[in-house]
Amino acid sequence: MVTEKTIREILSEVKDPEIPVLSLEDMGIIRDITISSPTEIIVTITPTYSGCPAMDTIADDIESALMEAGFSPTVKTTLDPPWTTDWMSEEGRKKLEDYGIAPPQKGSHNKRSLFGKAPEVRCPHCKSMNTAMLSQFGSTPCKSLYKCQDCFEPFDYFKCI
Amino acid sequence: MAQASEKYVLRLADNILILGQRLGEWCGHGPVLEQDIALTNIALDLIGQSRMLYQYAAEIRNDGSTEDDLAMKRDVFDYYNCLLVEQPNGDWGKTIVRQFFFDTYHYYLQEFLVNSSDQRLSEIARKSFKEVAYHAQYSAEWVIRLGDGTEESHQRVQSSVNDLWTFTGELFTPDELDREMQEQGIGPDLDVIAANWNKKVNEILEIATLQIPEETFMQSGGKQGEHGEYLGFILAELQFMQRAYPDMKW
Ligand SMILES: [Zn+2]
């Protein structure tokens, strides 16, 4: 008997192609799993950023992982409710910081003002709060670029949406 | 249940595809690496958002067309973007002013569309709005930095404000389709969007020590498919592969 748990275990091995320490589960992008027959599985995911080029790869990776396990998967996409960084798991946040990326702050669902102050972010290397934003836009759509004023290392901050 | 017309969805999509394409021209040419990355990130967001709209427009069209057909196989007169977004990048200041005018409009438009009576448009807007808020903040901050910067940056960015002002009226001038969408609760009352836009733009330009041009003549036609000379060149580049190798896939 196939259960959702079995499927989730298989999917926990599928990583975000751009941040390979995070699983899709950590990211909170798997929105639904429907088992329509013993072999047919429908996985519904939601995109992180609209232009995230990793989404197509993610869908392919889910399909391959399930096919390897003997299922015939279909991957669907849903937009609503829109993904928010609040859905990232605690474990995911911890892994992100260990990987050198400052995790997103909680409470991003509050409406942003047009002139919000840059959030205070902890340096993932030396844990100092004495950091400054260099650029709102970083190496991928989901990140801002920060620098630490104590250890002088630049780092990425996973920005809130 | 309310459903937008295909043309209305295409207008929304074309604006951000064309602006995304323009911003992409900066890739590798930005004044500093961080800003090069910022503009291409914004381009990526916009093109990603346009894909969701093209997918929807293709579903409304319902003749087997795909999002790619809509982006890659229409010619100039079937593109409904506003004239503002097709204006050339110019210098950094001009790109920023164009972005600021558009982002501010886009922000208030998305804010409305979040509650559009067209459920799909509402879903897409819920997704896009959070990204657009970042764009609007970014371009407004740059207008201030340049306007209240050096004598040269001030003068350059003021001349871009003067040049681009004439393309802003079109955003807020409703035509029959805009009114029809407004009546059905699908699209906004453009007077309301205009009031919000004017308030924000006035506020930012004042902080930036910039003047709003007195000239009031406004260009129009883009959203009806009447474009200036630039769009053809943009499409030639955007659509080159599909024109040279029809239906080729990546
Ligand atoms: Zn540090």
Image (cartoon, rainbow, N blue to C red):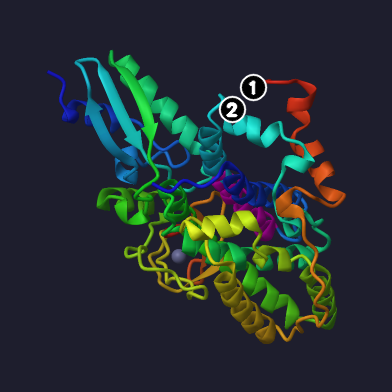
Q: Residue at x 64, y 63 (%)?
A: B174
Q: Residue furthest left?
A: A1
Q: Position of residue B223 (x, y in %)?
A: 70, 53
Q: Which residues are magenta?
A: B33-49
Decide: is B112 above or below A14: below
**Which residue is at 55% across, 39% downward?**
B57
Residue at 33%, 34% (x, y): give it.
A44
- As helix, strand or loop, the secondary structure at mark 2 comes to loop
Q: Looking at the picture, which amino acid does disc 2 mark?
A: Ser
Q: Secondary structure at mark 1?
A: loop
Report the chain holding disc 1. B
Q: In this view of the protein, which residue sits in the foreground, B199 or A59?
A: B199
Quarter location, residue A72: top left
Quarter of image, res B104: bottom right
The answer to whether mark 2 is within 8 Å of ligand 1 is no
In the rendered image, residue B154, in percent from the top left (x then y), is placed at 80, 80
- Name the quadrant where ligand 1 sits: bottom left
Spatial CA span between label 1 and label 2: 15 Å
> Label 1 neighbourhood size at 10 Å, few (<14), some (14-19), many (20+)?
few
Residue underneath mark 2: B65
Tell if the residue under mark 1 belongs to the same chain as the one under mark 2: yes
Q: Amino acid at mark 1?
A: Lys
In the image shown, does A140 or B16 lie closer to the viewer? B16
Question: On what subunit does the disc labeled 2 rest?
Answer: B
Q: Is residue A82 a member of the stretch shown in magenta?
A: no
The residue under label 1 is B249
Disc 2 crowd rating (10 Å Cα; few below 14, some 14-19, many 20+) is some
Quarter of the C terminus of chain A within the rendering = bottom left
